[in-house]
Image: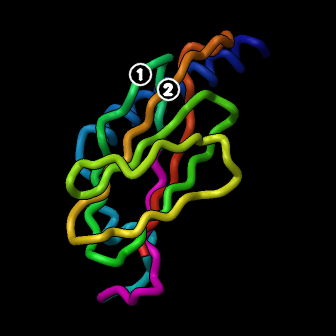
Amino acid sequence: MKKKLVSAALSTALVLSFSASVMASSPTDISTAGTTASSGYSNLEAREVVKYYSLASYEETEKEAFVLSQGEELTVFVYNSGFPITYTVYDADGQALGTYNTNTPYGRIFTAQKNGPLYVQFKAGANSSFVKKMNFSAKFSIS
């Protein structure tokens, strides 16, 4: 029984690690993700994507680019099970809007001040537990 649990946990960690490295390497296009409409979007329709990450202590992801039009909102909600992970959001000019803790029960909303990307970058702190990788997921919505 223990071997099966360990094997399943390792398999999951490998998939999450691979997913994070693939997903962090290219800009995120969620123009059609999570929608059911066959044509254009109304302002009330959200476009969503969930991404999975696996970071070692002090490791950080590449900056994820979410291209928005002026006035559009990016919502970031992180599903984290207590790991010391933070994320920084940057505006289209590369200026940091702020760094936020992921151990919150709510998401944060960022409004684009002009056309262009908002960037999100995750960073892991020190992990003193027996877990070598810190796995978490984040949901990104544009509305």
- Residue 11 shows up from this direction: no
Tell me the element at label 1. Answer: loop
Relative to 62, does residue 131 appear above or below in the rendering? above
Q: Nearer the viewer, residue 38 or 61?
A: 61
Tell me the element at label 2. Answer: strand
Please state the horizontal and vertical placement of residue 104, each as a whole percent of the image.
Answer: 67, 47
Name the residue located 70 percent from the left edge and 52 percent from the top edge: 105
Q: Which residue is mark 2?
A: 124
Q: Is residue 39 left or right of residue 37?
A: left
Name the residue located 29 percent from the left edge and 56 percent from the top edge: 91
- Residue 80 shows up from this direction: yes
Please state the horizontal and vertical placement of residue 100, each as a whole percent of the image.
Answer: 53, 44
Identify the amino acid type marked 1.
Glu
Gap in Å between the C-alphas at discs 2 and 1? 5 Å
In the image, which residues are magenta?
A: 40-51
Q: Which residue is mark 1?
A: 59
Name the residue located 26 percent from the left edge and 63 percent from the top edge: 67
Q: Nearer the viewer, residue 20 or 58?
A: 58
Q: Is residue 47 magenta?
A: yes
